[in-house]
Image (tube, rainbow, N blue to C red):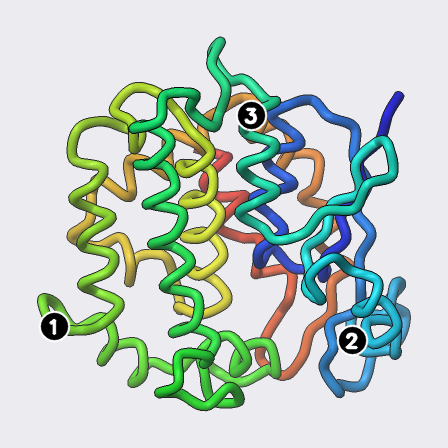
Amino acid sequence: MSTYKLRYWNIPGRGESIRIMLTLGSLDFENDFTPLPFTIKNPENTSPPPFDDGSWAKQKPQTPWGTLPTLTLPDGTIVGQQRAIIRYLGKIIQYEGRPLYPEDPIQALTTDGLMDMLEDIWPILIGLNGTESFNTAPLLTTMFGKPHLIDFLEKKMEPQKGELALMFDHIEKAYSTGPYLLKNQPSCADILLFAAIAWWGAAMFPSMEMILESRPNIKRAIETVGSWKKIKDYYCTLKSTRKTLPTVGVTKYQDFYKNFHSLSMN
């Protein structure tokens, strides 16, 4: 059987949406986990080592764009960039008889719009938008084993004013007509939203509720995706494997997956 290979860190991040897409397409794939490029001492008895062992510095020049994730196709071609990979897979994977990346140009435009909107949120949370320090942003704080930045998040999520709150409000409005972005037609944008909220709601926010409170449409959307049988089965089989992930300070890396499991258990 032809096999895809996903190279990414052993966290959800930008890789989990691709894992979900491959699972939905019943495409055989393997995870090629690269240690995170952090100068944190590796806990004992962890294999593969979760933190920098020098491998990323060697791998980076060999990637198409100098970033992860990358996906190796069955013919050996290596492609990169999360959203490009998602769109490619969406064109070859069907759900309920339709491709997950729409063939209709307007529907495709709408799908791309949400995926771009989600991309706009990332820099704020990882400190790359020019206003926050990379070392004091929500993601790096928790990954380095420190508590969530509640003051930072409360400011960004202040109703009708906070930068992140306004962005999530736009997404809430986009889902006002049905359980999916395209009303009753699922798309890869819904999967990207599911993966993003589940990840952000553990790694950057103390819980998803900080995002979902007063946003029932987003909640309905991610719960709907989490109820798909292939997604439920996928996370059921993975639950035990997450127990081997490291603990750094107050952060249990296995908790980065807790929302994926809870959403798929409903």
Front tag of 2 and 1: 1
Q: Are marks 3 and 2 in contact (CB under 8 Å)?
A: no
Three-letter amino acid code of the residue under disc 1: Lys
Which badge, 2 or 1, is on the more N-terminal residue?
2
Instruction: Give the residue number, with chain letter if any, for mark 3.
Output: 91
Q: Which mark is residue 51?
A: 2
Query: Disc 1 on helix, strand or loop?
Result: loop
Residue 146, position as x, y percentages in the image: 53, 85
Task: Tally the numbered discs.
Answer: 3
Q: Which mark is residue 161?
A: 1
Tell me the quarter of the image containing the N terminus. top right
Three-letter amino acid code of the residue under disc 3: Lys
Residue 18, position as x, y percentages in the image: 62, 42
Determine which quarter of the picture holds residue 12: bottom right
Q: In the rendered view, tell whether residue 217 sits above or below residue 118.
A: above
For marks 3 and 2, give the CA distance: 34 Å
Which badge, 3 or 2, is on the more N-terminal residue?
2
Residue 255, position as x, y percentages in the image: 57, 60
Query: Disc 2 on helix, strand or loop?
Result: loop
Give the crowd class for mark 1: few <14, some 14-19, many >=20 residues within 10 Å.
Answer: few
Determine which quarter of the picture holds residue 173: top left
Q: Residue at x 37, y 35 (%)?
A: 223
Q: In the rendered view, tell whether residue 162 sits above or below residue 171.
A: below
Q: Are marks 2 and 1 in contact (CB under 8 Å)?
A: no
Farthest residue in the front direction?
Answer: 105
